[in-house]
C-alpha cells in the first residue's frame, strides 16, 4: 500500500508540473502570489469530515497565513500588470473579495 501511495503522489506532482509547464512564464511577484493564493484556495475548501477539532485549527491557521492580504495584493497586481493580458487572465481566476 505504501508503494501505491507513493505512486499516486508522484503522478499527482508530475501532473502539476505539466500543467504549470503549459502556463506562460509569469513575473516572479505574480508567480509567488499564484502559489500563495492556490494554497489559500486549497485550505478554504478543506473541511475535515468527520469534524476534527485539531485538524480544523490547523486549517484555520493555514487560511490565516495564506489568505490574509491576498485581496489587496490581487488588486495591486492587477493594476501593475494592467497591460499584460496573460497575467490578467491568470489573476482573473481568483475571487477578488475573500477576506
Image (cartoon, rainbow, N blue to C red):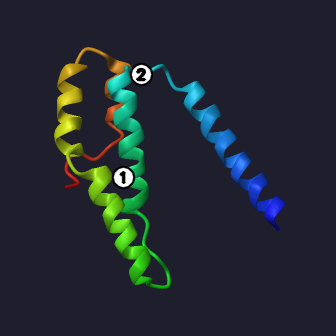
Front-lying residue, 95 or 44: 44
Above-or-below relation of 33 to 66: above
Picture coordinates of residue 85, whole percent (x, y)? 33, 19
Which sits in the foreground, 40 or 88?
40
Q: Is residue 63 left or right of residue 4?
A: left
Residue 99 shown left or right of residue 25 in the figure: left
Percent x, y for residue 50? 49, 85
Label 2 neighbour load within 10 Å: few <14, some 14-19, many 20+? few
In which quadrant of the rendered image does the C terminus lie? Answer: bottom left
Q: Considering only order in the chain, which callout, 2 or 1, is on the residue closer to the N terminus?
A: 2
Q: Which residue is the site of mark 1?
A: 40
Taking the image as shown, residue 99 lies to the left or right of residue 51, namely left
Labelled disc at residue 69:
none
Question: For the point 33% across and 33% down, which residue is it?
Answer: 91
Residue at (31% x, 16% y) in the render: 84
| Disc 2: which residue | 26
Kindly state the secondary structure of the residue where label 2 is placed. loop
Write the residue at 43% across / 66% down.
Answer: 46
Amino acid at each position: 500500500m505504501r508503494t501505491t501511495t507513493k505512486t499516486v503522489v508522484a503522478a499527482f506532482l508530475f501532473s502539476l508540473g505539466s500543467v504549470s509547464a503549459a502556463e506562460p512564464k509569469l513575473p516572479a511577484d505574480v508567480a509567488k502570489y499564484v502559489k500563495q493564493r492556490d494554497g489559500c484556495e486549497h485550505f478554504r475548501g478543506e473541511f475535515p469530515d468527520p469534524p476534527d477539532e485539531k485538524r480544523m485549527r490547523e486549517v484555520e491557521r493555514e487560511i490565516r497565513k495564506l489568505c490574509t492580504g491576498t485581496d489587496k495584493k490581487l488588486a495591486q497586481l492587477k493594476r501593475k500588470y494592467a497591460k499584460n493580458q496573460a497575467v490578467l487572465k491568470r489573476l482573473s481566476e481568483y475571487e477578488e473579495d475573500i477576506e
